[in-house]
Amino acid sequence: MTSLRNSVNLIGRLGADPETKTFGNNRTVARFSIATNEYYRDKNGENQKETQWHNIVAFDNTAKIAEKFLAKGKEVAIHGKLNNRMWEDDKGVKHYVTEIIADEILVLSRDN
């Protein structure tokens, strides 16, 4: 059951093209977000759609795959883990973010 600890699987569509950077000793990072939709009926019986946005981060080979194959609107499956981080800006304000560190990316759509 250890493979279930801090494990995330999502299917969604990219909101924008991935942003890729090289840093350190030839390491690569790609950042992008995907939207997932959930459908339900409200108390009046009306169909509703709720969209959640998820921040995705990929490193090295996974980042290179994202850079090469992903684009805004593509449907993807992501497997990874949750990562919470905090930083303090110049004015001393603390910022918090939750991201998914992608281990695997599978492109599900051929075009947008």
Image: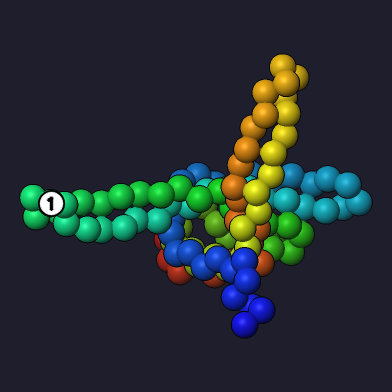
User: Which residue is found at the position 65% from the left and 58% from the top?
Assistant: 101
Give the x, y percent position of residue 39: 25, 58
Instruction: Name the image quarter holding residue 111.
Output: bottom left
State the scheme by which the image is colored: rainbow
Q: Secondary structure at mark 1?
A: loop
Amino acid type at circle 1 is Lys
Q: Residue furthest right?
A: 25
Q: Is residue 14 left or right of residue 4?
A: left
User: Which residue is found at the position 74% from the left and 64% from the top?
Assistant: 61
**Residue nearer the viewer, 76 or 8:** 8
The quadrant of the image that shows the C terminus is bottom left
User: Which residue is found at the position 16% from the left and 56% from the top?
Assistant: 41
Q: Residue furthest bottom?
A: 1
The residue that mark 1 highlights is 43
Residue 65: in sight, yes or no? no
**Residue nearer the viewer, 35 or 106:** 35
Give the x, y percent position of residue 94: 67, 29
Give the x, y percent position of residue 48: 20, 51
Image vertical order of residue 93 relative to residue 61, above or below: above
**Residue nearer the viewer, 37 or 24:** 37
Q: Is residue 26 left or right of residue 78?
A: right
Q: Is residue 63 left or right of residue 9?
A: right
The quadrant of the image that shows the N terminus is bottom right
Q: Residue furthest top?
A: 91
Give the x, y percent position of residue 66: 62, 58
Q: Is residue 74 left or right of residue 40?
A: right
**Residue nearer the viewer, 6 or 56:** 6
